[in-house]
Amino acid sequence: MTILNEWKQDYYDVWLNIRFEFLKNWKSKRSLVAAGISVTLSSLFYLVPLLTGSDFPTEANEFLATSTGLINYILLLNAIFFGADAINGEHHKKTTLLIYPLPQRRSVILFGKFIMQLLTSWGVILIYYLITGTETVLIYDVNALTVDMLKSILFSFLYMGALLSITFFLSALIRNPAISMALTFFFFFLLFPTLNTLLLMIDFDSSWILTNYSAFIIKLFRFPSDIFGPRHLRSPDDIDFYLGIRICLIYTIISFAGAWLFTSRKEI
Amino acid sequence: MVTTAIETVNLAKIFPGGVQALNSLDLNIRTGESVGYLGPNGAGKTTTIQIFLNLLRPSSGDVFIFSEQLKGQERKIMRRIGALIELPGFYDNLTPNQLLRHICRLYRMEQGVMNQSIKEILDLVQLTEVRDRSIGTFSTGMRRRLGIAQVLVHDPELVIFDEPTNGLDPKGIREIRDLIKTLNKDGKTVFMCSHNLPEVAEISNRVIFLKNGNVIEDRQMREFKSRLSSNIIELKFIRSLTEKEKKNLNSITNVLNVVYDHSIFIEYQGSLDTTHQILQDLLKYNFPLYYFTPRLMTLEELYLQLFGKEVI
């Protein structure tokens, strides 16, 4: 009964922290900047051809694949904006001295923060897709929006979870927010891609490298299936779609567990 | 009923690298006390407070707050504590109202009680006018007062302060000191870490001196008074003394020496109680006395006596 009551208290505290993080995000310029970048990038693929008088691709899926080509930058930007200083930023600004002595577990703060930052990131991604979708309808017609669009959105949400989880882990591990931000760049722009190339060179399995699966977001449009369901999630390309989902989930869970451990155990 | 507010048993803290911040610390703070916790830099004051607030884990030993072991019951215990450690960071984009609302919700305060409590506390710390202004625009003094507000908004039984008046102007210092004294009068237990010795002397009824992680003095403030005795009494008379009176002054029992300056200072032998006898003798011999004050050592002077010239 006591444990059940403790859980209830924890769930309520998580909810309070989600609300609090929402308020902080709402008042922060970061969300606005991220949304602005999302709007700008997604508009480029419609406005540039329109202003220069160039032709749009003949196939809607080709347009969608090109437009979503930049979503990876949005995902990484989200991870840096909303995750890279999520934990160590609190230490840096000394707000831990304010919130840690309050009657709540540190893990509760972490969960509330992660959920809200994930929702905010998803919001920024949705803006990108909404604009891209609207552009597709304007250029082609409403039938051009197939189930692949939904699958692409869901996969970017999943991939975003993994990215955010890794940045939360780095933020919990490293005290300096500037270093954790730099490391996030290093991991996703340099370390993972370089490692992947090297492993391919020596013919070694690189399927565990997360960044390989960001390509799914675009590939879904290049190899449309029209049917939504687990059996049809396998891409006709050579990359295993199921494996992509599993890898994203594994990265999310393990990194978040690491972030949880460090946040709960680390001393001020 | 007097119970224990804070108790530590063999509390020790060794930081990575082998720095021993606390060394088998035994404290017993009773409810309703106002305790000044003093010591030089690195004595272990802030470490102690951070352990109480679950910001640091002890290397060994136990902490009991209101007779309940802190370990494993942190959330329950924290509901009864309000703490202001140094000057914490605040969320600059938020307003005091928004921040305090979040804090009240964590303390499970009902809407009506929360509204009333926030209103009262903002009135008390004089931030009502700026309750909906971004904290980012606040001065250090306003931030300090907001810190006090978040300590008190849930009406805690134990309040812990670490340098509560740092960065405040003289008016602000006076207000905060009066506020802390009022809190103690209202029955709250006050545990205060401070470098400011006159502040501790004014606010606290018990003083604990810490050095190298060990308690070296722990006394009620009134007991300290005798330690603070400098065996000097300052006197003032309504007119200059005659030669005969000067001679009589020297012959009063226990008076060792008389110095004539802007006032008259007499050095005496014996304890602080001797001053009572000297006063009686002065009155008996009809000295035209209008000012009689045993000169006490300041807490600073005592501190220097205890710690030498260590930086405080």
Image: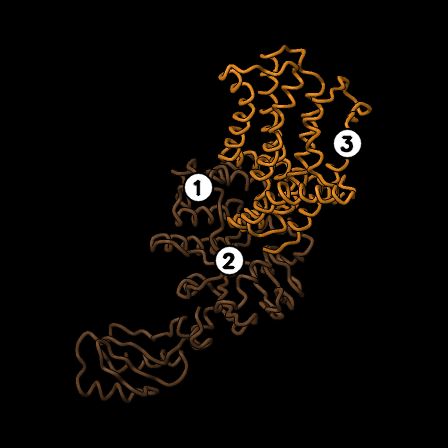
Q: Chain of mark 1?
A: B
Secondary structure found at label 2: strand
Number of numbered tags placed on the structure image? 3
**Residue at x 52% of width, y 20% of height:** A48
Q: Are marks 3 and 2 on the same chain?
A: no
Callout 2: chain: B
The residue nearer to you, when weighing A260 against B216, is: A260
Q: Quadrant of the N terminus of chain A?
A: top right
Q: What amino acid type should be assigned to the residue bearing mark 1?
A: Ile
Q: Are marks 2 and 1 in contact (CB under 8 Å)?
A: no
Answer with left or right where residue A172 lies relative to residue B132: right
Of discs 2 and 1, which sits in the foreground? 1
Residue B190's mark? Answer: 2
> Which chain does the residue under circle 3 lie in?
A
- In the figure, the brown chain has which letter? B
Q: Nearer the viewer, mark 1 or mark 3?
A: 3
The correct choice, above or below, for B111 with respect to B284 in the image is above
* Image disc number at residue A239: 3
On screen, A143 above or below B258?
above
Q: Position of residue B170 (x, y in %)?
A: 34, 55
Q: Residue at x 63, y 67 (%)?
A: B12
C-alpha span from label 3 to label 2: 64 Å
- Residue type at the position of mark 3: Ile
Label 2 vs label 1: CA separation? Answer: 27 Å
Q: Position of residue B104 (x, y in %)?
A: 55, 41
Q: Is residue A153 visible?
A: yes
Q: Image point 41% across, 63% down: which residue?
A: B196
Chain letter, colour orange in render: A
| Nearest to viewer (mark 3 / mark 2) | 3
Check the image and report above or below for A203 versus B241.
above
**Marks 3 and 2 in Cβ contact (< 8 Å):** no
